[in-house]
Image (cartoon, grey):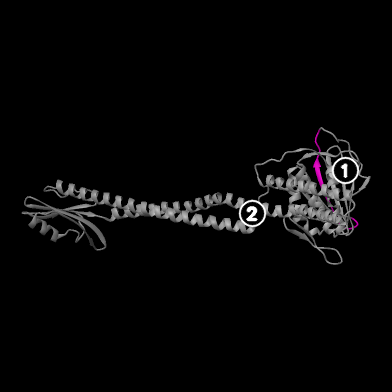
């Protein structure tokens, strides 16, 4: 089984819980925006209707007053939807077609008696009318306006305002949800980045701290014995070196956590780097009863990258191999004119083919194949390896070894010019 693929640089995918929180927040913001817009639209619609109805009533009164004022002996020349009623010494006359009961005889009598003009609305046979009555000399004139067309226009205006307001409400809710997602996205990304940094730091610092603990224990053992000062001095130097590596790992983690930061790159001899990582892990591997071997020729295998990041990647792969190996882990470095390859092989449980799609995902695990039922677990180590390799424009592959165990292959492009262009010979083993 072989699985390979590039891991996206700077991947900041949200977890399901973070995505759910983002959706809930966006929905809440959308609802709040919709309610605010609904309140604003309601106020605007109310104000608009009040202004329109007031203007409409004023226009209606003005039209009726003008029609009544112009009415002389002839009541036939009335505006559309208006009927005139004239009561004088010669009797009462009205415009043809005046609806039955539309004229208000009581209002005619009151105005004829008091001389006070009056305006009011009345309903007759299900129809609404506005009536204006005034006296001119010994003649009283009344205008009757059919409010049916006016009310129809009013309903049309109201429906239009409600339609526009409802559409605005829907658009506001959608825009609020979209803006909510955009507003919360940086916060969610920051939360995801913080969680990833904590997880990465916890994982990446575990191996250097384990090495420091092992070195310190060896140094204490030599000091307690009181002899072999050279070995104690070597352990002390290794302790200082591992402390420097720990500080470098912390700095690289901080750089990796900043999406805008770029780590300094330089030409690196992968053979030397892999040999150093193998030598540093030999003590921890020995405590587990595992032997680490570094194989490769003497010719340099040069790539361009960040030394600390590449050391982190090789350390993670080697640590994974040591944890699952039965007896031996082999680190091999070789190259051709275009690519440099580092292979880390162990004789532990093989790889489950079903894990291929998720092999470099965080906290993935594959079923174990050892007699004691152990599982090969990867946590976030291989995910970090994939991200580091992707930043260096390389690829990482996982292969099931023919005789059992697993092989992880890291491939990097080689610089077009520089030292170490010649391929190396992987046949020369070096014990670590």
Q: Residue 415 carries which label?
A: none
The correct choice, above or below, for 372 with respect to 51 in the image is below
Q: In which quarter of the image is residue 96?
A: bottom left
According to the image, label 1 marks what residue? 334
Pick out the residue farthest to the right: 428
Q: Nearer the viewer, residue 257 or 404?
A: 257
Tell which circle, 1 or 2, labels the residue nearer the N-terminal end: 2
Quadrant of image for the N terminus: bottom right
The correct choice, above or below, for 382 with respect to 255 in the image is below
Q: Nearer the viewer, residue 105 or 424?
A: 424
Range shown magenta? 402-416
Pick out the residue farthest to the bottom: 372
Lateral position of residue 18 relative to residue 415, left or right: left
Q: Where is residue 82 in the image (x, y as percent from the top left)?
A: 21, 52
Q: How crowded is mark 1: few (under 14 residues within 10 Å), some or many (20 or more)?
A: many
Q: Is mark 2 on a helix, strand or loop?
A: loop
How far is the residue under mark 1 from the one under mark 2? 37 Å
Lateral position of residue 350 relative to residue 62, left or right: right
Q: Is mark 1 on a helix, strand or loop?
A: strand
Q: How crowded is mark 2: few (under 14 residues within 10 Å), some or many (20 or more)?
A: some
Lateral position of residue 222 relative to residue 313, left or right: right
Pick out the residue farthest to the front: 226
Q: Is residue 156 visible?
A: no
Q: Nearer the viewer, residue 5 or 286?
A: 286
According to the image, label 2 marks what residue? 14
The correct choice, above or below, for 79 with respect to 421 in the image is below
Q: Where is residue 7 in the image (x, y as percent from the top left)?
A: 73, 48
Q: Is residue 424 visible?
A: yes
């Amino acid at each position: 089984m072989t699985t390979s693929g590039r891991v996206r640089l700077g991947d900041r995918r949200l977890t399901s819980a973070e995505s759910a929180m983002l959706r809930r927040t966006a929905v809440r913001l959308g609802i709040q925006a919709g309610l605010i817009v609904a309140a604003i639209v309601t106020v605007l619609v109310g104000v608009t209707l009040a202004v329109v109805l007031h203007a409409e009533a004023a226009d209606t009164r003005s039209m009726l007053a003008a029609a009544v004022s112009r009415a002389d002996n002839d009541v036939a020349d009335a505006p559309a939807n208006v009927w005139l009623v004239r009561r004088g010494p010669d009797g009462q006359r009205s415009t043809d077609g005046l609806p039955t009961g539309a004229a208000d005889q009581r209002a005619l009598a009151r105005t004829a008696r008091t001389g006070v003009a009056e305006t009011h609305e009345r309903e007759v046979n299900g129809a609404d009318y506005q009536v204006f009555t005034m006296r001119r000399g010994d003649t009283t004139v009344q205008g009757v306006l059919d409010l049916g067309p006016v009310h129809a226009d009013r309903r049309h205006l109201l429906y239009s305002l409600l339609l526009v307001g409802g559409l605005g409400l829907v658009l506001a809710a959608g825009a609020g949800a979209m803006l909510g997602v955009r507003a919360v996205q940086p916060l969610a990304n920051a939360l995801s980045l913080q969680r990833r940094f904590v997880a990465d730091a916890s994982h990446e610092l575990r191996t250097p701290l384990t090495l420091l603990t092992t070195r310190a224990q060896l140094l204490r053992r030599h000091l307690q014995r009181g002899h072999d000062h050279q070995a104690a001095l070597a352990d002390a130097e290794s302790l200082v070196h591992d402390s420097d590596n720990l500080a470098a790992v912390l700095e690289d983690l901080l750089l990796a956590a900043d999406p805008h930061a770029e780590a300094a790159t330089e030409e690196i001899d992968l053979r030397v780097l892999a040999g150093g990582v193998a030598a540093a892990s030999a003590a921890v591997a020995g405590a587990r009863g595992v032997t680490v071997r570094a194989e490769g020729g003497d010719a340099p295998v040069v790539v361009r990258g960040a030394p600390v990041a590449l050391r982190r990647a090789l350390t993670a792969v080697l640590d994974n191999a040591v944890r699952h190996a039965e007896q031996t882990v082999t680190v091999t470095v070789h190259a051709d004119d275009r690519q440099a390859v580092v292979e880390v092989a162990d004789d532990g449980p093989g790889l489950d083919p079903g894990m291929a799609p998720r092999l470099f995902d965080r906290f993935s695990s594959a079923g174990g194949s050892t007699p004691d039922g152990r599982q090969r677990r990867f946590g976030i180590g291989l995910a970090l390896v994939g991200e580091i390799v992707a930043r260096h424009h390389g690829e990482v592959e996982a292969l099931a070894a023919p005789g059992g165990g697993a092989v992880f292959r890291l491939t990097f492009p080689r610089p077009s010019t520089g030292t170490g262009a010649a391929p190396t010979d992987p046949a020369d083993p070096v014990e670590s």
